[in-house]
Image (cartoon, grey):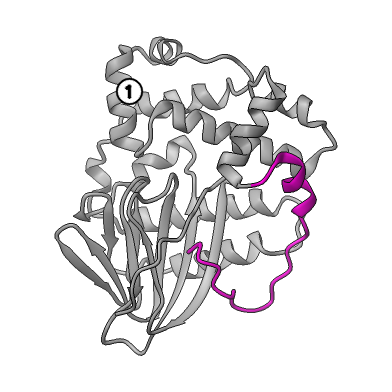
Amino acid sequence: MAQPHEFSHTPVIRLLTGHYRETSGYRVHRPDGVGDWLLILTITGAGRFGHVGGELISGPGDWVLIRPGTLHDYAVAPAAAGWELLWVHFHPRAHWLEWLDWPAIAPGLMLLRPDPPKAAERFHEVHRLLHGDLRQREAFAMHALEGLLLECDLMNPLAATSHYDARVRRAMDYLDGNLASKVLLDDVAAAVGLSSSRLAHLFTAETGQSVQRYLEMRRMQRASELLARTGFSVLQIAETVGFDSQFYFSQRFKRWTRQSPLAFRQSLRPVHRDRVDTPSGRG
């Protein structure tokens, strides 16, 4: 197998999809995972997912879900001629969490079989909508993704015993509603009825990221949306997402996106796709 290459992935937008047809030699390696969830459907061929206890071979109709902060080590399976896959990186809405408790192959690596009847069709629709011409294409794609996850939940043998804590979902809702404010861990903990230490542990255990990282990620997402869809100045956007200093906001935004806010805004172009994506290393 080809030597792994560590692909960077710094998610800012809420949703990112791809449809790849890969041949031998394709491999993605991110030792520390990423800050969002990754869902991969094998359409044809086979993929290999490495984990601490061995490997998982994914065949047609297999759905693989990877939690934030989990090793990414996936490639075309050694014995396969190729691998056609659909993938989506996403940040779930708070009420989606209970739908993401799938049977685990290894910590953070989950597999769902059999193939939900309409889910593959919905997955194609998510990809088509996100890369289409609609003005609110991301919102339409997120709506389709919600339907996809509901279809998968119908086939999930663990659905009736999901352990996700409602207080984590309430914490996420609280953070999403206070992006412009100074938010302390104590404030979030008080809002959901937990001690700060208990909330910090529970939030990380269930979402794969700390409260502070989730808050900054959501602020950067909101900032990217404002840069893309409004004419607000960088200072206005910084204040809207809770930063007193435009300079510090720009520093943090560049750390997440590798672009300054102005460079990010200037780089935006309408996306038009009528064919399978060319791999960019972000699958």
Q: In this rendering, is residue 262 above or below 30?
A: above
> Residue 158: where, in percent of width, then height?
23, 49
Q: Residue 160: which quarter of the image?
A: top left
Residue at 72% of width from left, 47% of height from top?
264
- Closer-to-camera residue (123/46): 46
Instruction: Farthest residue to the bottom: give it.
Output: 81
Residue at 59% of width from left, 77% of height from top?
276
Q: Is residue 208 magenta?
A: no
Q: Which residue is the site of mark 1?
A: 200
> Residue 116: where, in percent of width, then height?
37, 66
Question: Around disc 1, counting alpha carbons within 10 Å, would you say few (fewer than 14), some (14 to 19), or many (20 or more)?
Answer: many
Q: In this rendering, is residue 218 above or below 133?
A: above
Horizontal arrangement in the rendering, residue 271 relative to residue 9 (left or right):
right
Q: In this rendering, is residue 24 above or below 58?
A: below
> Residue 274: where, in percent of width, then height?
69, 77
User: Which stretch did the figure color magenta?
Assistant: 259-283
